[in-house]
Image (cartoon, rainbow, N blue to C red):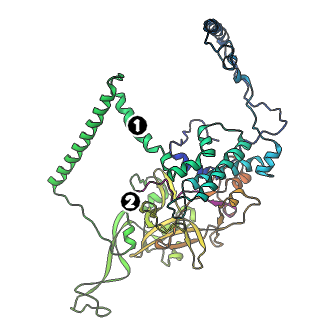
Amino acid sequence: MVPSGVKQATLKGRQWRYGITVWALMVAGLIGRRKAGSRDPCDPPPRKRKRGEDAAGSAETASMSSVAAAVATMLEEDGASDAGSEATACTMSGGEEEGEREPVAEPDATADEWAEAFGTMESHEAVLDVVCRGAKLMARTCLDNEYERTEWTDEQINELSVEARDFVCTFVRVLFGAVHTSKMHRLAFHLADELILRGNLSEADTSVNEMLMKLCKAMYARTNKHVTTFKVQLLRAQQTLERIIAEDEDRKNLAEAAMGEETKVFEPCDEQARGEVEEPAGLSHEGGEMGALLGRADEDEVEVEGGMDWEGGEPAGPQRAPDGGQARRKRVRVRGRRVQVGDVAGLHGGRLQALPELLELHSTQYITVRNSAVFNAKFEWKAEPTVKEQKQEVRAAAMLWSAPWYDHVRWYDDDGAPCYGLVRLVLCAKAGTSYHAVVVQRLVESPARPNCILTKSGCERLQWKMDDHTGFPALEVLLLRKVQRLEHIVPDFEDLCERHGLLATPGNIVETPDERTMQRYFTNVWYPWTGGLSYELSR
């Protein structure tokens, strides 16, 4: 699946908690369950020896055999020897373990157990079902996307404990065989005790300790590693480091005081402007039609829609202030790139060609766009999210951190039904007027596949809402204040691979009008937008 020479991402520490939330939406079933009565070998064939290895191998084997014989003689003379026990019987004369030559044991599951656990599922469906159950169990234990909960009840603890035991002892064992690890044992038999004693699983998160251990390892590398003095040297290194940091902070404060610089704070004129943020570091516009057209971000002053500012007092008439002052529009400074609507409509291979009509502007009029905007997210399961959870940033950039970045959003229509879309543009002004909105490509509900595991788990299947005039997904302008929250949406890889083969990805498939009509997507119901193990910056 991955070409040689490509460096793959690795999950470390608490990243495993988030990694399981996307496994269910990836291709599953590359390796199926071993069928009953199969004579296919479980292990790969032995490696062929190269020339010159036979002589060296025989000499090495003879040497190890003589050493093993001498050790066995010494052990026989020792009365406390365990020679002849089960442990030594598994060691062969060459030093290798006897179990290495035996085939891998098959899963301890019968046909009745398979039917009881998975029914009539195929092997790849069973794998997907187990991964979905694992993601659901992880979300429940970490309180991901849960309503406000201050404590666990005994009924909830017992229910979760039974679910964890069934996951390990039934579904995982039947599919993969018995997994004898300490973590699996604790999950299956000691989850209830952990929740009763501590009330949560936050104490089980070791990412903070692992991060602090890096500093200790760096300090230990600079000691003489003597068993009687290295502890004192570690303490001195810690005190020295704290002193250096304090001196750097004092020096920085003195330098700022000497320069007499004051940080300027600009108060926006409207509520939407409060969501403005500086352009993210690492942004690059080099390469690509979007970067060549839009260039770098700049500041611009635009009028506030529906707002009037008066020189000399409150408005007393439609045109003049009471003291004779001239009326003028209230203006606000926005940061973005000012470009003609017609030029933007030609981007993205024609996907935005309906933009002038959608914004009710001529192709020669100007709009101001940017790569991202901050908004206050609203969660249907949590009325009072933390500040970190509430502040979300929607992005639509052709090149951000060396790759394209387009977010999906969720909102409600006039009837209260949830809607989804892919953000293509982030607007902050149009025709010289403040206008904070996003341009999205609409996604609508798609019929579910028969007996679909992801649909049973709560994921919604979506497809593009096509525009008959353009042949591209239909566009819609959505005010930023109407966006409910971000949504994690991924392609339906099973459907994609059935149409284009196992190696097909959204990036290597040629997009045609027919292909866009057949593309399907899934919402990720396990993505942790809020959670019990999410670290809070502030309330």
530 is higher (above) or lower (below) than 504: below
Q: Quadrant of the N terminus?
A: top right
110 is higher (above) or lower (below) than 117: above
Q: Residues within 10 Å of mark 1 (few under 14, many from 20)?
A: few
Classified by dominant secondary structure, the portion drawn in magenta counts as loop
Q: Quadrant of residue 216?
A: top left
Range drawn in magenta = 516-539
For numbered disc 2, what is the local secondary structure?
loop
Q: Is residue 56 left or right of residue 263?
A: right
480 is higher (above) or lower (below) than 156: below
The percent position of residue 148, horizontal first and vertical second, equals 51, 64
Amino acid of disc 2: Ser
Q: Quadrant of residue 47?
A: top right
7 is higher (above) or lower (below) than 284: above
Q: Is residue 521 magenta?
A: yes
For numbered disc 1, what is the local secondary structure?
helix
Q: Is residue 460 magenta?
A: no
Q: Which mark is residue 406?
A: none
Residue at numbered disc 1: 214
The percent position of residue 399, horizontal first and vertical second, equals 47, 55
Q: Residue at x 27, y 40 (%)?
A: 242
Residue 354 visible? The answer is: no
Residue at numbered disc 2: 538
